Image (tube, rainbow, N blue to C red):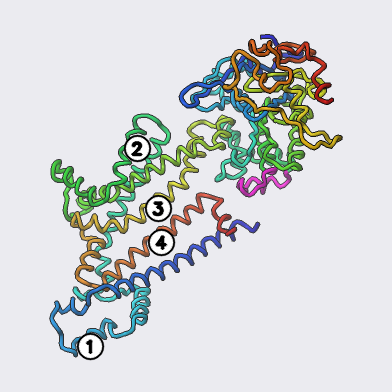
Amino acid sequence: MGPAESVHLRFFVRRLAMLLVSLLVASFVIFAAIYLAPGNPIAALSGGRSLPPDSLHVLEARYHLDQPFIVQYWYWLSNAFHGNLGISITLRENVSDLIASRISTTAGLVLYSSILIIVIGVGLGILSGFKRGLLDTSTLVITAISASLPAFVAAIVLILVFAVQLQWFPSLGNGVGFIDQVRHLTLPAFALAVSSLAIVARVTRAAIREEARREHVQTAVSRGIPTAELIRRHVLRNAAIPITTISGITVASLIAVAAVVEVVFGLAGLGAYLVQSAQSKDLAVVQGISLLLVTTFVVMNVLVDVLYAVLDPRVSLGSRAQ
Amino acid sequence: MNRAEPAAGAPLLELEGVTVRLPVEGSMQAVLQDVSFAIRPGEALGLVGESGSGKSMTARAIDRLLPPGAAVTGRVRFGGRDVMTLSGADLKRFRGEVAMIFQDPRAHTNPVRRIGDFMTEALRTNARVPMDEAARRAVDLLASVGIEDGDRRLRQYPHELSGGLLQRVMIATALLTRPRLLLADEPTTALDVTTQAEVLAILDNLRSELSLAMLFITHNLELAAAICDRTVVMYAGQVVEVRESNRLHDQPLHPYTAALAAARPSIDATAHRLTAIPGRPLSAFEAPAEACAFTARCPYAADVCRERRPALVELDGGLTRCARARELFGRLEVELHA
């Protein structure tokens, strides 16, 4: 057996290579899908009026529309690599700048949701994992219902109860200043978190039950390890492996669902902008946002993989044996 | 309780009429029935029986590792104190004085913690021994179980060690808290044959060196005889025989022990078929309340065996739970070996 460090290094190098390959494939799929999508960007630009052939040629040359598909892809990819995602056809602005001005809303929403999922979901899972009884039963029932609740339904229910009836939280817009922004993001964050939170709670509960039953926990009991240490060192520590996996995957998937929630709550985020740009055939923006979302998703998954290897010493050896 | 306890000092561990019931599909089923025996300080006691006879359950009852919902009656005394009522600091001290070695070392070590952490955990958390001192003692003990590169081993994870090596680590770990009693639950069953012999030799040597008492659980009668001073034979959750190990094989008191001995293949003779005990072993909760549990498989079963459950009776320096023990004494081994 080689030194542990080289095994780890190989693991990380392999994950990094896989990350780059997934990104390349994703970028190609995004570009190809939009290339094949019905609708003509020039027509969108001209508002449906027919343009004189000269102007048409100028526009086609500016957006490289006269080039073959693969050349267009290459232009787009190499520019994207340098942070240049092209120019919005409708707004005549740099796509990177347009994204930058909206990214904080989406990032805030996803972060807020993630915190809710991890704190409430994992917390509830741990409590009901250790304690049988009323709390456990009610957690099971509530999570069974909320796990099957799509974000847009949750959003409507939350708006009805907390914005219309109780008037605790606003239901529209971004807000101004930090406190007001957090208030405006609260209902969207809960709407986004609800079903993932339930799934994380259930997986956490199952993981705790599973780990508490392990034989090595018996060993620790037979050695008189105090209960608090037993739970921390042998149950929680080992359950952290599946909990990290499910939390990571769920949080990564929030990025996609955020679009729906942003539209429902009228938030000026990336997701809502993506939907709007797709409707107005603003191809550069659609491509740019899609690429960003996919990249974030893939990077988050790699982070979860790495964390998984850090938490479970058997993982790196497993990958070596493949 | 009628027991043949040689007069050499007070027993270290004493079981008196221990009955354990577990919830099975809604009703409480007995897994141990009226189990009584004692271990003197420094004595090795074998506990032999087929799978499901209650050997492991007995060890778990002693170490208070029974599953939740288990109901225990009878008494377990360790060093004169009632084990079942221990709590707090007393329970912690008991856990330090009674160490358990499990059958499957891999399942019984936490896969995400290093060997060093596993070995020194009890010392650090219960005895407040500093880390480096605990590690030094662990390395010393690893050397005494034949692991020379202890420093390196402490930094490894369980999955990086072979089963035999891990079981030696287990033994060293069990000895770290300087216990007075070792509960060894089939410590070599999961290992391959050559490793078994090594691990047994190590266990046996250390035990006599440290004059440690041991309850050695096995399904192998010869192994028990080789390692232990006395052997308890269990069947269907009951003790059926207690005997000096060296006489167990040659002069069994209970037909079940005799059948177990006969089932072992002989090295001297070639057999076309191995002898097996007819029928199947009974679980404790299947054992009839008003008859001897072995009746259905016993070649000597008579009407008297079906009338009531026989009591443990003293015979020839041992104990046996057989209604016809006196009548059959001296005949069991002759007939089986014929």
Asked if A24 appears above or below B236 in the picture, the reply is below
Q: CA distance from mark 4 to mark 3?
A: 11 Å
**Where is residue A262, by image quadrant?**
bottom left
Q: Are marks 2 and 3 in contact (CB under 8 Å)?
A: no
Q: Of marks 2 and 3, which one's residue comes earlier in the chain?
A: 2
Q: Kindly report the distance in space between the C-alpha atoms of the residues bearing marks 4 and 1.
A: 39 Å
Q: Which residue is mark 1?
A: A57
Name the mark on residue B204.
none
Residue identifier under label 3: A248
**Boundaries of the magenta span:** B147-165
Circle 3: residue type = Gly
SS category of the residue bearing label 4: helix
- Residue under mark 3: which chain is it in? A
Residues at marks 1 and 3, CA–CA distance in whole angstroms? 48 Å
Give the x, y percent position of residue B50.
67, 29
Which is in the foreground here, disc 4 or disc 2? 2
**Which residue is depicted at the point 16% across and 53% down?**
A172
Check residue A299 in the rendering and tell me which mark sits there, or answer none: 4
Q: CA distance from mark 1 to mark 2?
A: 63 Å
Q: Is A191 rendered above or below residue B69?
A: below
